Amino acid sequence: MRFLKGFCVLGVSALMGAAAGAGCGGDDAGETSSSASSAGGTGGGAPADCSPTNPVCTAVASECIAVHDNQGATKFGLRMAQLTITKPDVLAVGYIARLVAEGLTMNLPVCNLNGTGTFSWLLEFDTATGKLRTGGAMPTSDPRAGYCFANMSAGEFEIAPKELDAPLTDGAWSGAADILNVPIFLDTGAGGAAAEPIVLPMHQVQLTDAKVSADNNCIGRYNREGLNPMEACLPGPDGDPPAFINGGKLTAFITLEEVDRVIIPGIEQSLCVVLSGDIGEYGTGETPNTCKRDESGEIVLKGDWCSATNSAATDECADAYALGGEYAASAVKITGLCPQ
């Protein structure tokens, strides 16, 4: 796909700069990422697997590097630790996939988690009411201090958590939301307010095939045996091997009209242009570069989904793309709504 090649050339330098910063900087425990490569072993020898042993990582007993203990709680929170996009294909690999992975991965190098942690999607369960509150969070420089739900506007998009019916049955659950706008922040806002986020405007969101662990601390688990100690226990560039074994699924759709108004900072391309896979064929070439339109003002690009019927596209309706993914999540402290 020739667009992706050009897109990665444009964007990967910014992404790799963020990755280098997360990988080389110290964390709150005063250790650098160089120590993370031996986090699973002792005495300087090669670890048998990638199980972190630093007290920061083991303070809460869990299978997913939880940083807050939900054991026995009736109201508890988790944060997506990994989101593997499975469709559309153009978002499943390359720059956008790595941008998502880098943002979702916590900045805890001593736990083999060398991300920026600026993109947070929270899940807050209330077992007494059978409700789930879900949405994006403002970035934090210390993941152990807790997260608050973003409650703001970004351009035309209103960002706030949604409450869903999601009762737990032996840990298994599912939930649905008509609309959910999730913010993807690219910086921590250290020293001031975070920059305006990229917004992922989703419709007919379905969270399915998920199970919360018995201790309420995990969905899925850390891939301690699948990562390579000789590669600093880091996931592969396109998530192979992954840092986590996913434990839940996500489906939704995104409309071309909305994502054409979502501009990716640094490369000044709309998400619609990204989805096209061909900047020359479908981009206007202007700044920011948005999707071409016909004489009637309709976007020329055709998606694989129809928003009116929430089903596969037809010749008469192809104004959206189906979104799919799988995720893992680990326990965090949730402090409520962020102050506006």
Image (cartoon, rainbow, N blue to C red):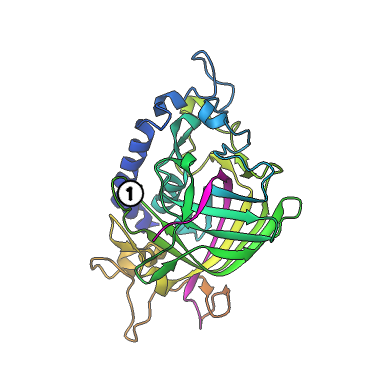
Find disc 1 in the rendering and name its residue.
Answer: 189
Q: Position of residue 122 (x, y in %)?
A: 53, 53
Q: Position of residue 64 (x, y in %)?
A: 59, 39
- Prevailing secondary structure of the magenta residues: strand
Hey, what amino acid is under mark 1?
Answer: Gly
Q: Position of residue 133 (x, y in %)?
A: 58, 60
The number of callouts visible is 1
Check if residue 326 falls in the magenta segment.
yes
User: Is 253 above or below relative to 60?
Assistant: below
Q: Residue at x 62, y 59 (%)?
A: 132
Magenta residues span: 316-340
Would you call the spot at circle 1 few (<14 residues within 10 Å), some (14-19), or many (20 or more)?
some
User: Is 53 above or below relative to 87?
Assistant: above
Residue occupying the far left of the picture: 287
Relative side of 116 to 290, left or right: right
Residue occupying the far top of the picture: 43
Q: Residue at x 30, y 46 (%)?
A: 14
Indicate the secondary structure of the residue bearing disc 1. loop
Q: Residue at x 69, y 55 (%)?
A: 127
Relative depth, front residue between 115 and 146: 146
Check if residue 318 falls in the magenta segment.
yes
